[in-house]
Image (cartoon, rainbow, N blue to C red):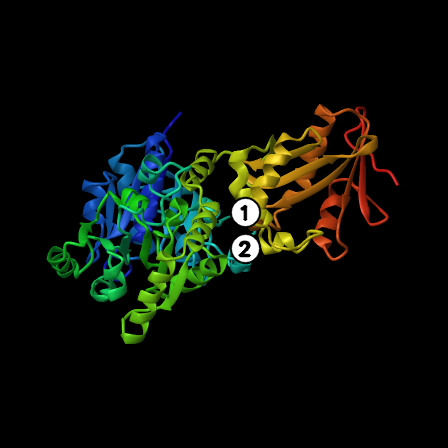
Amino acid sequence: MPKLRIAIRADSSQTMGTGHVIRCVALAHHLMQQGCEVCFFCRELPGSLNHWLEKEAKIPLQTLSDNHADTMIKALGSWLDSIQVEQNSIDWLLVDHYGLDATWENTVRQAHSETMQKVIVHKMIVIDDLANRPHDCDFLLDQNYYPSPQKRYEGLLPDSCRQLLGPRFALLRESFLETVSLKYSPSVAAGRDKPPRILLFFGGSDPDNLTLQVLHVLLDAPALIDLNVVFDVVVGDSNANKEAVKALCLKDSRCQFYCQTPEMPQLMKEASLFVGAGGSTTWERLGIGLPSVVMAIADNQVALSEALAEEGVQLYLGEITRLDSSNSQTLVAAICTVLSNTPLRKLMQAKGRALVDFQGVRRVTEIIMAKSITQNARPVLLRKANIEDCDFIYLWRNHPETRAYFLDPNPIERTDHEAWLKKVLMSDKVHLMIAEENTIPVGVLRYDLEEDNTYTVSIYLDPTQHGRGLGAKILQAGTAWIQDTQTLPCRLKAVVLSQNQASHRVFEKAGYHEVSSEYHLTVTAQNNRSTDG
């Protein structure tokens, strides 16, 4: 089987930061391990990671002079020439760039190169989180957390575009998988024999020099001196003030300085608290369960930081580019609050780990490797739920859009959810199924056995997958599973609230028949479905 050829368009610099490139590198390394040919296409900008990409990350690079589509097309042709392929085609183009939109994407899709008769781009993935411009792509990936993420891109994408939304698709570096056990529960409170450790990081470039500003404040804060707090201070190689930060750290024995370090997983694992920007490290620290005090250092970090604060996974201090006496006091007070409040830290830890499972790179890789599966022909498969599904079931089950149509719409406590799931998995009268599409969980289907061989049916989806017609497909797959595995004939029934019009349509489409505010379906061995009144 020929290798897949995957081109990645992303930039880094002192002003735009390094997050776009770093998350794409995580995906690139995993794709290369699967045997794919991968190449980055980047401009040479002040403070870029281009040298690091080639020398340290060891990924091929084509340098671009500008953002024009024609320049990209020529560079694609040059790359294909360099790897001496017979077909002038790119299997996937991944674009992670705020400055590019549907016009650029469409032009590259129709690419004609001067060096080759034609360069064909078969599939395109766009990574975005701004939702402020149209895209022409097959997949849109937004790994950020929002209460109603799919609505953000209404009118901005082709009808055929599939959206990969939420932290389950966060592109996290493999070093976190290697270093951090998913069952690890960090000692977020400092032990009696160890001082609290604060991990300080304001992004790879930190254009406002907040690292130095914050470090000065924290080192002089009496409350933190009394707590014997120590600091791990991390900067990127593109940080223009890194030498000044390093000099301050060398003067104070409480500080350890790191520049463009590969040790970030271990530093997060050992930290008591993260203080820094609400940027690309968000998902890594949440997945590890590291409590955080964050501030937005760019406009695109504001909405995400606010949403995560409302979810209870971090304290958010607002958008800050310069410290003054007021916000300095607020920062120190917030740090002291978290360090002194064990229940708060444990709550942040549990909620953060419920959002992120470190499997985003694997999920996206599986989509790319399964490119022959078309948009309209992806099968929905069912499997039995297990305890490893606890986190995402909790997240979906507790989502406001899901709870709104429960008979009991109140929020569910994490401990109650875990106890419920363990009980359900041990029951011989409850069948809890996970619906998967290309091995990615997309929904939960439950059958509760009652008298007279009747099952009560309930279903809910990953909130990011609403509007794709998955509900009826899952119910139909469930009916086939019932027919293959259970005693027949049997009756399926579902109670649907009157205001939940979407669920009414789903059950009707799946062959159920409304009977006195319930939906019924009789399953027999002779026929796949038969409705009754």
Q: Where's residue 273, x and y in %?
A: 33, 53
Residue 8 circle label? none
Is disc 1 in contact with disc 2, using a CB cutoff of under 8 Å? Answer: no
Left or right: 240 in relation to 188: left
Q: Quadrant of residue 432?
A: top right
Task: Say which label, 1 or 2, has the lower sequence index.
Answer: 2
Residue 529 shows up from this direction: yes
Could you tell me which residue is drawn at 36 percent across and 64 percent down? Answer: 334
Disc 2, SS: helix
Q: Residues within 10 Å of mark 2 (few under 14, many from 20)?
A: some
Query: Which amino acid does the dot numbered 1 rest on?
Result: Arg
Left or right: 80 in relation to 433: left
Left or right: 122 in relation to 44: right
Query: Which amino acid does the dot numbered 2 rest on?
Result: Gln
Q: Which residue is mark 1?
A: 414
Q: Where's residue 337, x and y in %?
A: 38, 61
Q: Quadrant of residue 7?
A: top left
Left or right: 145 in relation to 400: left
Q: Which residue is mark 2?
A: 150
Q: Quadrant of the C terminus?
A: top right
Q: CA distance from mark 1 to mark 2?
A: 25 Å
Could you tell me which residue is drawn at 47 percent across and 53 percent down? Answer: 136
Extreme-bottom residue of the structure: 325
